[in-house]
Image (spheres, grey):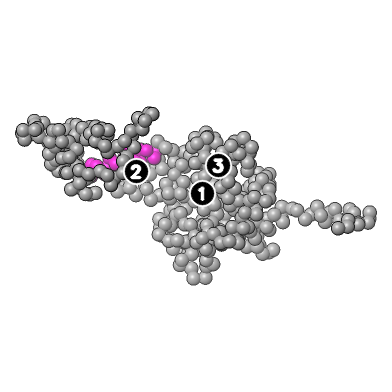
Amino acid sequence: MGRLKVDHKDKTSVEKKVGNLYTISLLVALCRSYGIILARWGGGGTFDYIVTSKSTGENGNKNAIRATNQVQTCAQSLLNTIAFSTHIIRSIWGIIQLDKRIMHQIQNLSKGKINVEMIRNLSICCSRTSSNAADGISLLYLFSCSFAHTLLITDDAEIHDLEKPIPLHQVRRLIVLFKTVLHHVCCNEIPKCQRRDSEKFENSSYFGLSLIHSIVRVMQDLYNRSSRRPLCLPKLWIIDDLLTKEINSCETFSDYEALLTIPVLNVFPALVPLKRRMKLFERIVTTNRLSVQGSHATNNLRPGIRVEITRGRVMESGLRYVDKLGPLMIRERLAVTYVNEAGATEGGIDVGGLFKDFWVDLTNEAFNPGRALFCTTAGERLLWLRNSSMINF
């Protein structure tokens, strides 16, 4: 193949043309085109984290463009090429960090200061006359999709030691950026969802839903990796005071249980501090027990279900009563009385103490290796459950 001959006079003009081929405008145009393909045929455009009763927010809009439920071959091939055969991840992240206009658009996205009211309603087009306001959204979407796809074959050593796909300090910046977007999605868009504004749901686009899905994938993958080998300080994942007011305003079991439907606990619960999640769990368990069993403090302690436990046959008699209770009655208070070998009832009123004794005795019997319910390992003598089909009472 011969060399391309260029006259000296035309060399400068050729270099200018070649130099202008690879610009941010071209990259944005590619991101728009590729983003539409990946969002529509990549399988992420039907994931609706906020409205779980609907597969997508487009069900009510007959004119809405549908997205596929599964990844199509064309989208998979395109994503493989972009993620593994180009340097687009570092390039886009560099533009996001350095271009003030792009960063300003993404920051407005995370703060809700965009033309549309909900991120789930976002859409892009590849028309040359399209608005430049969607440039940051297009870059962010292709970056998140490519980053999530790259993490599938990236191990922890590559992230920490080889700085792949981006340096570790940039991963921390990514976590801060993505958590603000998820916080806006899960919290700031909740009031409209609680009002059941069907119009907002009907206007949800496959691109907006796919953008949320790709960001959630990245955050979940990074958080799981950070649990094995920390990527950052634990406080970098959380949002301060998240769910504090909601938990403090609850009084009954139904109030606490309703908090479990909040999108943040279903989308990315790591945004909520662990102690606050544990407090919510403790309050759910406590209020549920009080609503079913009552308490001495409120003078409404219920009699409970009488359970007779025979000394020397704690497991047999205990399981005989427990098996009959079922999933609903098992939450009732169990009034335990012990019967000795002669058949006489032992003294004592069960206000919690006898039930505790029964539970301790039952646990000791169940984990006794002589019962053959569990087997012990040879080295550390750890317990593991035997095949349930071999257990007979």
Looking at the rendered image, the quarter that the N terminus falls into is bottom right
User: Upstream in the sequence, badge 2 or badge 3?
Assistant: 3
User: SS class of the residue under badge 2?
Assistant: helix
Q: Are marks 2 and 1 in contact (CB under 8 Å)?
A: no
From the viewer's perspective, is 339 left or right of 69? left
Find the distance from the CA under tag 2 to the CA under tag 3: 30 Å
Where is residue 22? Give x, y as percent. 75, 53
Between residue 162 and residue 253, name the one nearer to us: 162
The region drawn magenta spans 276-293
Residue 74: which quarter of the image?
bottom right
Where is residue 65? Give x, y as percent. 54, 67
Looking at the rendered image, the quarter that the C terminus falls into is top left
Instruction: Name the residue at 50% across, 36% down.
Output: 228
Q: Residue 216 carries which label?
A: 1
Magenta stretch, overall SS: helix
Where is residue 374? Give x, y as percent. 30, 37
Residue at mark 2? 249
Residue 272: which quarter of the image?
top left
Find the distance from the CA under tag 3 to the CA under tag 1: 11 Å
Instruction: Give the amino acid at mark 3.
Output: Ile
Residue at mark 3? 175
288 part of magenta stretch = yes
Q: Nearer the viewer, mark 2 or mark 3?
A: 3
